[in-house]
Image (cartoon, rainbow, N blue to C red):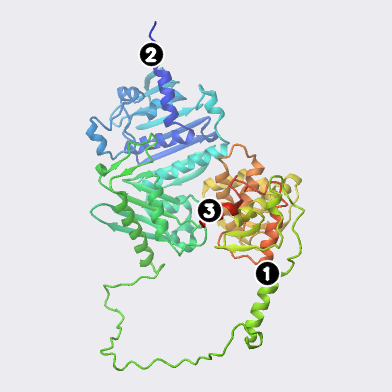
Amino acid sequence: MPDIIKLLPDSVANQIAAGEVIQRPASVVKELMENSVDSGARNIDVIIKDSGRTLIQVIDNGTGMSETDARLAFERHATSKITTAHDLFAITTKGFRGEALASIAAVAMVELRTRKEEDESGTLLVINGSKVEAQEPCSCAAGSNFSVKNLFFNIPARRKFLKSDNAEMRHIINEFQKIVIAHPGIRFSLIHNDSDIYNLPQGNSRQRIIGVFGRQINNDLITLDTTTTLITISGFIGKPENARRTYGEQFFFVNNRFMKHPYFHKAVIEAYQNILPPEAIPSYFIFMDVDPASIDINIHPTKTEIKFEDERAIWQILMASVKEALGRFNIVPSLDFKGEGLVDIPVRSSFRDIPEPPPIEINPRYDPFAGNDRPSDQNRLIERFERENTAGWQKLYGGHEREDQESERMVTDRKLFQIKNKYIICPVKSGLMIIDQKRAHERILFEQFLGNLESNRSLSQAQLFPVDITLDPSDILILREIEDDLRLLGFAFELQEGNIVSVTGKPSGVGDDPGMMIEILLEEYKSTQSDPSAGAREKVASAMAGASAIPYGKPLMKNEMEDLFDALFMCKSPNYSPKGKPVINILTLDEIDRRLK
């Protein structure tokens, strides 16, 4: 029987490896920019055509490469960063595996022009799908100039699954931001289809953040500065009153490398406890400096997931650092036990002069249940309670039954109760019906907004004064993508220079703050992007419903609960929210009996 195990050709192996490292155009931008930073460049220009499908070009003035180095750089696991396994525990550069250029060359047409400062001529290298087609001397500036053309030209399936141009450009902007914020001493520019997106001069961290997110963020930044033997924490956090409803201004860096860390994110949120507006997300730009030997950055091909040796201790230090910064700027009340102005609390020397407690008059004949003896206020209160909870008890609820749950919705006395300002409880034949009030309202609004979009009808309410909001460039791209549908829903706005959106009208009867609604809508829309079954209008209607629905924590009057209840069961699909989460749950009598045994 012949052998069946064989080695893959290099071209196939490189394409498999590219699937881990190069997922979309933004991955190429990230890898090439990081190589430019590692080369010691002080100027880095990124040029994009058609959101990276046609061209991704990164030009730097770094050290450049010799002819031999330029050729070896495209071989798998060829790197100048490490020589022994011990070096993995002292990594201070961005890339070190030697996979990026080989992976890029496997799925694109690549041209490299590079020259070292001391060399008279440079090197031109042309590679298509891992195949070297040309290598020759050329005239070029010192540094490196990478041009990546026709990404995934040889893998049509991968190219087919790229998102829209706006979606891919948003990813590119996000990767660009992560690198430029970490390196304010380098000048960066980003150009898309001959239009300047960013032009960031050299500066300090505050200046770079202002350059990326706009001047309005300057007054929102609170300085972090904590030094311990375990970690040094610096950077900025945002004031809670300016927290936004969208993600996008939350950045962790360790040793100037961007990282994702949900555990540390919770530490920041914990520090803001009880001082954030509902559903708001604070901005933060937090830089951590630690011993490279105490972290492991080699656990994921993209190197954004990092393992710390002592995460719990760092969690505590981070939370304390954020709390201290908030207290220092009088955002939260704090007590200074080290100052000289301590409050002088008098201490009684003895208990002899404590006065007798005041006498309390008691009427032993008072009957709180005797109608004639009750105070008038108490009478009115009880009468109101009885009236609100017994009115209409004889009316049967019907007319909106659904298959498989007909008996559950025959509510005999319309008794509705709200728990924790989050759930509406209603007795039904088989037990208790529990309704998530926010998801129920989302379902109602979703079907309403979708109907408006499909029929091209909406009511718009003009703003007396325009509301200006400043958005991230990636959010501006989303707004452009869904602009027509938003206008159909009743929004009126103008896009101005500096990523400013001037809102002049909003859908009638929805929300009081159109700027906040736009921010929530954008974040909701981002969260629906992963649903391939939803069309563009369904995504917009779902995002709009999420932005407009009543929030958790809002107390509802009895008539409001009844209106919500009735409207929910008039919907085509009352059981699930637009995102597919359950709206209704039945706690059966059998389950209640089991719990009470």
The residue lying at 53 percent from left, 90 percent from top is 364
Dot 3 lies on which element?
Answer: helix
Which mark identifies residue 594? 3
How far apart are the two marked residues, 1 and 2, measured between alpha carbons? 77 Å
At which x and y percent is residue 427? 64, 59
Give the labeled residue for mark 1. 389
The residue lying at 38 percent from left, 13 percent from top is 6
| Up/down of 548 relative to 102, above or below | below
The tag earlier along the polypeptide, 2 or 3, is 2
Q: Is residue 502 visible?
A: no
| Residue nearest the observer in this picture, 204 or 485 | 485
The tag earlier along the polypeptide, 3 or 1, is 1
The residue lying at 71 percent from left, 49 percent from top is 406
The answer to whether 251 appears left or right of 411 in the picture is: left
| Up/down of 79 relative to 288, above or below | above
At which x and y percent is residue 447? 69, 49
Give the labeled residue for mark 2. 5
Which mark identifies residue 323? none
| Up/down of 197 relative to 340, above or below | above
| Residue nearest the observer in this picture, 383 or 113 | 383
Residue type at the position of mark 1: Asn
Tell me where residue 219 sits by quadrant.
bottom left
Tell me where residue 275 sits by quadrant.
bottom left
Q: Is residue 394 visible?
A: yes
In this view, the mark in front (3 or 1):
3
The answer to whether 381 appears left or right of 41 in the picture is: right
Dot 1 lies on which element?
Answer: helix
| Up/down of 26 relative to 254, above or below | above
Q: Mark 3, residues whose alpha carbon is within 10 Å: few (<14), some, or many (≥20)?
A: few
